[in-house]
Amino acid sequence: MILAVDIGNTNIVLGCIEGETIVFRERIYTNQLATDLEYAANFKTATDMHGVSLESIDGAVISSVVPTITAVCAAAVKKLTGVRPMIVGPGIKTGLSIVIDNPAQLGSDLVVDAVAGISEYPAPMIIIDMGTATTLSVIDKDKRYIGGQIMTGMAVSADALVSRTAQLPKVAFEKPRKVIGTNTVDCIKSGMMYSGACALDGMIERIEEELGEKCTVIATGGLAGSVVPLCKRDIILDDDLLIKGLMKIYYKNK
């Protein structure tokens, strides 16, 4: 069994994979002050909850966009399982052709998403990852990573709105009762949720105009499940995309 860990700025996604089957997927809070022991305890809680024996884990893989805690999480995995994890980065085979200006700048999470995307879905495609930032990755018909967009994540926007105003409250990311809000909370919900959905619909339209063809659109990330149902475009929701990509990269390098 493989332990897969994706370290994001807000959350860490972790899961276990048996062969080609994802046994579980969970999220924990990214804490840059936590020690390897604290992370090991969190990882153990997740495996225990899903009945996964530590003795059954014989491999591990990590991708990270938070360099300051990559080594800490790697040490946590080693402490917990006795396995030295594979780190997605330079020298790791991905099978992905990256044709942007500087391929070394591409975040490992976007690489992992794209590796899963090209193996699971027809190209050309747009992969949306809704985390701290909302990113769109564009894969052309030849399955080459040709570029994308980075937008402010919805949670970051909401935090900025609340912190920069005197009377606006923090609200949950949930579908408002209607588009035209009639109270402050519903107005904020509508503004956050529908502006996020409209941004995705608009970016997809403009990307397809530039490519000159329709794309398969896949969305993943913590807020994707809340926003995708509000979009007018057909978008495939795949919460397991990161875990699938880590699994494929791990097997490519064994």
Image (spheres, grey):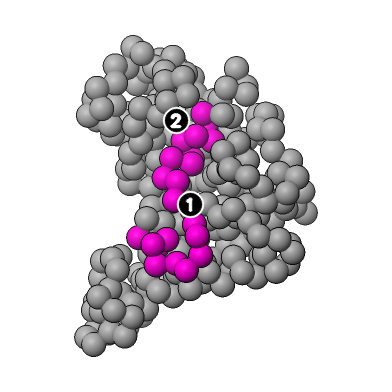
Q: Residue at x 46, y 35 (%)?
A: 243
Q: Residue furthest top?
A: 55
Task: Say whether residue 102 is visible.
Answer: no
Relative depth, front residue between 108 and 74: 108
Task: Tell me the quarter of the image containing the C terminus.
Answer: top right
Quadrant containing the N terminus is: top left
Mark 1 or mark 2, earlier in chain: 2
The residue at the point 66 percent across, 47 percent down is: 123
Q: Nearer the viewer, residue 86 or 94?
A: 94
Secondary structure of the residue carrying tag 1 is strand
Quarter of the view holding residue 135? bottom right
| Residue type, label 1 | Ile
Is 166 placed left or right of 146 in the picture? left
Kindly indicate the quadrant of the structure image that contains residue 197: bottom left
Q: Looking at the image, is 181 positioned above or below residue 206?
A: below
> In the image, is 34 to the left or to the right of 210?
left
- Which SS class for mark 2? strand
Q: Nearer the viewer, mark 1 or mark 2?
A: 1
| Residue 88 within the segment the image draws in magenta | no
Q: Which residue is mark 2?
A: 4
Residue 9 position within the rendered picture, expressed as x and y whole percent measured from the top left: 44, 51
Residue at the spot x=38%, y=62% of the render? 229
The image's mark for residue 64 is: none
Q: Is residue 250 above or below residue 217?
A: above
* Residue at image coords 34%, 31%: 24
Residue 177, given in percent of the width and then of the height, sits at 25, 75
Badges 1 and 2: C-beta atoms under 8 Å apart? no
Q: Is residue 67 above or below residue 152?
A: above
Q: Which residue is mark 1?
A: 236
- Name the quadrant containing residue 39: top left
Q: Position of residue 110 (x, y in %)?
A: 58, 47
The magenta stretch spans which residues? 226-247
